[in-house]
């Protein structure tokens, strides 16, 4: 019986995290597919990396040192697509889609609403277009999507909900957009296995927040309902350091 391990991690700069035990972590966990967000680099700036992964795909932002996604896979995908094929969204390297035999895998780094909510309107447009994109894929086969969605869905997903009510990542509008994803038929895999509070994937570098576990859960794996029977586990690796985010993952049968 074949089990497939997928890990997603916002690394907050691939070149920086390479100096912080990243390669050793990947060797230890040995995911079949690794999805990275906020790589902040072009592939040629990194050089040979993770040679155990034969299939490697980068989507870098046009603006250097900003945003970006990458996928490393031991399994050959049937097809690869970059972005949503919408020019207003596809300049920041935020999306890579791999087609496998039984599902599409979408690696996403959702835009941040920004301090002062200066980009909230754009993020709402992104969220709407992203859901349409997922549903188009789903007409062909089920979908797994993962990454930094830059939203804590419910109060359980954030350490101080009342203090953060109108802060980017916890506005009513952003949370409602995530509701639409769930109501459209996608499953938040982590909450299938763990209903406890204080389970976070991002902590600000300020105020000693990680040591105090004052965090947010904004990194997700979500799957089409059709894939629920093969979902065997979902996890947050909160003891793994190197970024302000920690890795999250799932195991499929």
Image: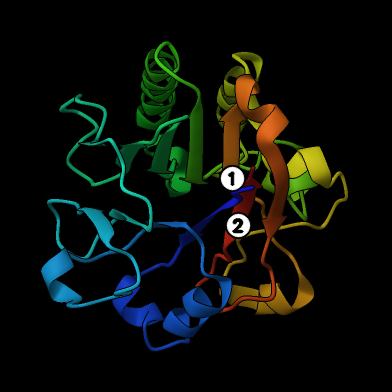
Q: Residue at x 67, y 79 (%)?
A: 208
The colour scheme of the drawn protein is rainbow
Using residue 111 as the reference point, say whether residue 7 is left or right of it: right
> Which residue is the extreme one toward the right?
196
| Callout 2: SS | strand
In the displayed structure, 47 sits above or below 136; it is below
In percent of width and height, residue 184 lies at 59, 14
Q: Earlier in the sequence, mark 2 or mark 1?
A: 1
Using residue 117 as the reference point, say whether residue 42 is left or right of it: left
Q: Residues within 10 Å of mark 1 (few under 14, many from 20)?
A: many
In percent of width and height, residue 161 lies at 76, 46
Distance from the alpha carbon under mark 2 to that under mark 1 = 7 Å
Nearest to the observer: residue 213 or residue 115: 213
Quarter of the view holding residue 50: bottom left
Q: Which mark is residue 220?
A: 1
The C terminus, quarter of image = top right
Nearest to the observer: residue 63 or residue 107: 107
In the displayed structure, 105 sits above or below 180; it is below
Q: Is residue 218 visible?
A: no
Quarter of the view holding residue 100: top left
Q: Residue at x 56, y 74 (%)?
A: 205
Using residue 39 as the reference point, say whether residue 120 is left or right of it: right
Q: Residue at x 86, y 44 (%)?
A: 195
In percent of width and height, residue 22 lies at 45, 80
> Which residue is the extreme one toward the top?
139
Q: Is residue 115 visible?
A: yes
| Callout 1: SS | strand
Residues at discs 2 and 1 in contact (Cβ within 8 Å): yes
Residue highlighted by disc 2: 248
In percent of width and height, residue 115 lies at 45, 49
């Amino acid at each position: 019986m074949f089990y497939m391990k997928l890990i997603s991690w916002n690394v907050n700069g691939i070149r920086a995290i390479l100096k912080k035990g990243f390669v050793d972590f990947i060797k230890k966990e040995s995911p079949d597919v690794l999805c990275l967000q906020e790589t902040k680099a072009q592939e040629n700036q990194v050089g040979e990396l993770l040679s155990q992964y034969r299939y490697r795909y980068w989507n870098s932002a046009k603006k250097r040192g900003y945003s970006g996604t990458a996928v490393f896979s031991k399994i050959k995908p049937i097809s690869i697509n970059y972005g949503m094929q919408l020019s207003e969204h596809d300049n920041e390297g935020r999306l890579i889609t791999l087609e496998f035999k039984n599902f599409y895998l979408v690696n996403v780094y959702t835009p941040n609403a920004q301090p002062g909510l200066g980009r909230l309107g754009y993020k709402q447009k992104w969220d709407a277009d992203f859901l349409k994109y997922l549903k188009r894929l789903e007409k062909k086969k089920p979908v797994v999507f993962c990454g930094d969605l830059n939203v804590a869905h419910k109060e359980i997903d954030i350490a101080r909900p009342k203090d953060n009510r109108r802060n980017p990542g916890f506005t009513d509008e952003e949370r409602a957009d995530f509701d639409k994803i769930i109501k459209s038929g996608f499953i938040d895999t982590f909450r299938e296995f763990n209903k406890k509070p204080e389970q976070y994937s991002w902590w600000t570098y300020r105020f000693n927040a990680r040591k105090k576990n004052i965090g947010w859960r904004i990194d997700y794996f979500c799957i089409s309902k059709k894939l629920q029977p093969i979902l065997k586990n979902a996890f947050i690796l909160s003891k793994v350091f190197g970024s302000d985010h920690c890795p999250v993952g799932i195991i499929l049968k």
